[in-house]
Image: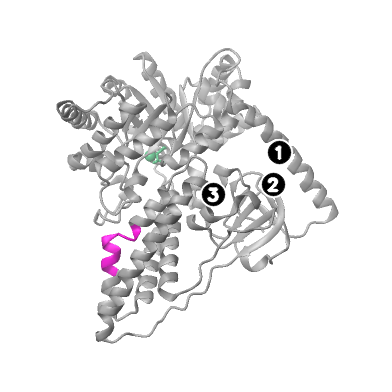
């Protein structure tokens, strides 16, 4: 069997097959006289589920490294989601469904809708919805809750899906590996496994029915394969690969502590991308030098209404305090496109990726934007914060955003609230327009951070989520590399700096080229930090410059790919 590598490494152990419990949902239509009763049953179930979630949320801090109960806050928010409650009540009233059937029907539709979305991080928020739906249905049907609390040593968990509630109560000391049928590389299971260093393969179709309890399982988190039987020779190969991998990892971990300096003294700042405070544990573990991109939209997506200033302030403050004097670039929310909100109707758009999103929404609704800027500014008193605007495509947008920022600063000054008055403010370079205008734009910002995911999408006119077209767009497309070079040079001429926070930053095959292009900072998923740092430490910036020049002269993505592969 094969799946998607969620957390690298090798594991051997005994299968614990963790099945979804059957819930007896009543599909009978109810009488009119029962409507109120069913609505009450639903309301009570919401209260019970929320109380359970809060209890598990408290346990979460003790189990996950550097974590708090973020994901459970999102779950609690789902139980208070006004539009969800309205829909379930309506299904009970108008369609005469039982409370359990109404919850199942309404949430199934929501889960389907989310699972079709392009952005993987959003698609995988369906895990949260599934978790809450199952909890509500367990309460409503009286089904027993499943548990992974006591496991024998060297267990390989085989599950259809692992919910955050499952992972929090899991006996992690005895888990050697995880295999799940559902999920992608940014699913909760994947993030959880990576932060604890447990090898995991997800998206393994049929694992739960094909693997039997107690069977020996060989999990290869380098190739994504999961086997239950190996021949003598295969076993020897597996063991040799496991030993080599473990030794290499031990070696790589030396780079968690090291400085990111090339042999000839060029410093490349290596930072990590985060979506919440929850990810900070991994930053410490892999030794990132800061946060190059804090995607704050997840705070908005996990709430049942626009998040209040106070709540945002406490979330940003936690991250800044945890990072000490290391810089944290807080990107103002990038909602819209495929990132929807349960409490806001974006209306129908023919091209949501080109639509009402990110800075466009912020400037159209400055009060919502100012609330976030005030929260970031207030938090800036507790660490080294930087602000970044997403999706900029004109100077006017930067000027208007800076006006809202100035207004927020003035308000806080008048209120006597402390903040970093010199807070740096930069922009994402993710539209071709911004890159082409770099020389004019640079005067209005402190730094650039190139979002190669969107920049590639908009430069090549290829939807970043369209698998059929993925061969047409690579973040190392010659047009993108040339834009990176141009933008970086422009920033340097003005005495400023440029980072990269798209996926290209974490692709260690390209580290040499990016050093050679003069990029100052790379921000990536925390797990990539050590392998990218190894590349930096082992290279010569002088040679990297020549390599970048040669790569820039190439005319196709394929030729560039061949070129970097041949240098390794
Ligand atoms: C990017 O576009 O490269 C980026 C880092 O932002 P996001 O992936 O959140 O759009
Ligand atoms: Mg982007």
Q: At 41% from the left edge and 58% from the top edge, which residue is drawn?
A: 53
Position above or below: 559 against 306: above
Q: Which residue is mark 3?
A: 190
Q: How is the image coloured?
A: one colour
Position above or below: 136 against 163: below
For mark 1, give the secondary structure: helix
Q: Which residue is mark 1?
A: 246
Instruction: Determine if the C-beta at disc 3 is less than 8 A from ligand 1.
Output: no
Classify 10 Å Cα crowding around label 2: few (below 14), some (14-19), many (20 and above): many
Residue 50, percent across and down? Answer: 37, 60
For mark 3, give the secondary structure: helix
Mark 2 and mark 1 residues within 8 Å of each other at the beta carbon: yes
Q: Magenta stretch containing residue 82, yes or no?
A: yes
Dot placed on the residue nearer the N-terminal end, 1 or 3: 3
Mark 1 and mark 3 residues within 8 Å of each other at the beta carbon: no
Range shown magenta? 78-87
Dot placed on the residue nearer the N-terminal end, 2 or 1: 2
Q: CA distance from mark 1 to mark 3?
A: 19 Å
| Left or right of 400, for residue 135 | right
Q: Report how many numbered discs are placed on residues in the image.
A: 3
Classify 10 Å Cα crowding around label 1: few (below 14), some (14-19), many (20 and above): some
Q: Locate residue 321: give its quadrant.
A: top left
């Amino acid at each position: 069997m094969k799946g998607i590598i969620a957390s690298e490494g090798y594991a051997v152990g005994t299968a614990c097959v963790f099945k979804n419990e059957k819930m007896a949902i009543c599909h009978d239509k109810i009488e009119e006289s029962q409507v109120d009763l069913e609505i009450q049953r639903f309301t009570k179930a919401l209260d019970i589920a929320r109380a359970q979630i809060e209890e598990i949320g408290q346990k979460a801090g003790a189990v996950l490294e550097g974590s708090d109960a973020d994901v459970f806050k999102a779950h609690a928010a789902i139980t208070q989601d006004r539009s969800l409650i309205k829909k379930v009540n309506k299904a009970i009233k108008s369609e005469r469904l039982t409370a359990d059937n109404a919850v199942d029907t309404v949430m199934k539709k929501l889960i389907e809708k989310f699972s079709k979305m392009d952005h993987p991080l959003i698609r995988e928020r369906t895990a949260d919805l599934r978790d809450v739906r199952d909890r509500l249905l367990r309460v409503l049907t009286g089904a027993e809750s499943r548990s992974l609390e006591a496991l024998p040593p060297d267990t390989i968990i085989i599950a259809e899906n692992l919910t955050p509630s499952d992972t929090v109560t899991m006996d992690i000391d005895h888990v050697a590996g995880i295999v799940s049928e559902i999920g992608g590389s940014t699913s909760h299971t994947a993030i959880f496994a990576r932060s604890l260093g447990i090898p995991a393969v997800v998206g393994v179709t049929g694992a739960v029915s094909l693997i039997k309890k107690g069977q020996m399982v060989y999990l290869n988190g380098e190739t994504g394969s999961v086997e239950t039987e190996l021949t003598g020779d295969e076993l020897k190969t597996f063991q040799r690969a496991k030993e080599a991998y473990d030794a290499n990892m031990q070696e790589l971990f030396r780079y968690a502590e090291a400085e990111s300096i090339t042999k000839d003294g060029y410093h490349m700042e290596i930072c990590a991308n985060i979506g919440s405070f929850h990810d900070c544990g991994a930053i410490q573990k892999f030794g990132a030098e800061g946060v190059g991109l804090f995607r704050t939209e997840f705070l908005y997506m996990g709430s049942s209404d626009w998040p209040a200033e106070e709540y945002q302030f406490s979330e940003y403050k936690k991250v800044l305090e945890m990072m000490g004097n290391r810089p944290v670039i807080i990107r103002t929310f990038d909602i819209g496109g495929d990132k929807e909100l349960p409490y806001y109707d974006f209306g129908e758009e023919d091209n949501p990726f080109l639509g009402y999103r990110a800075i466009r929404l912020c400037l159209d609704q400055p009060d919502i934007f100012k609330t976030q800027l005030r929260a970031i500014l207030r938090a800036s008193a507790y660490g080294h914060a930087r602000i970044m605007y997403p999706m900029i495509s004109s100077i006017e947008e930067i000027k208007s955003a800076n006006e809202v920022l100035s207004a927020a600063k003035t308000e806080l000054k008048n209120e006597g609230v402390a903040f970093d008055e010199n807070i740096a403010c930069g922009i994402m370079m993710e539209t071709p327009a911004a890159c082409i205008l770099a020389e004019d734009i640079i005067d209005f910002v402190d730094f650039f951070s190139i979002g190669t995911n969107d920049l590639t999408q908009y430069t090549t006119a290829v939807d970043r989520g369209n698998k059929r077209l993925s061969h047409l767009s690579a973040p190392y497309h010659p047009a993108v590399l040339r834009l990176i070079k141009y933008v970086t040079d422009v920033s340097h001429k003005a005495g400023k700096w440029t980072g990269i926070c798209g996926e290209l930053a974490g692709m260690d095959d390209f580290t040499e080229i990016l050093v050679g292009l003069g990029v100052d900072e790379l921000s990536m998923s925390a797990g990539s930090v050590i392998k990218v740092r190894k590349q930096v430490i082992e290279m010569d910036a002088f040679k990297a410059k020549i390599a970048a020049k040669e790569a820039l002269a190439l005319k196709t993505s394929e030729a560039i790919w061949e070129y970097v592969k041949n240098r390794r």
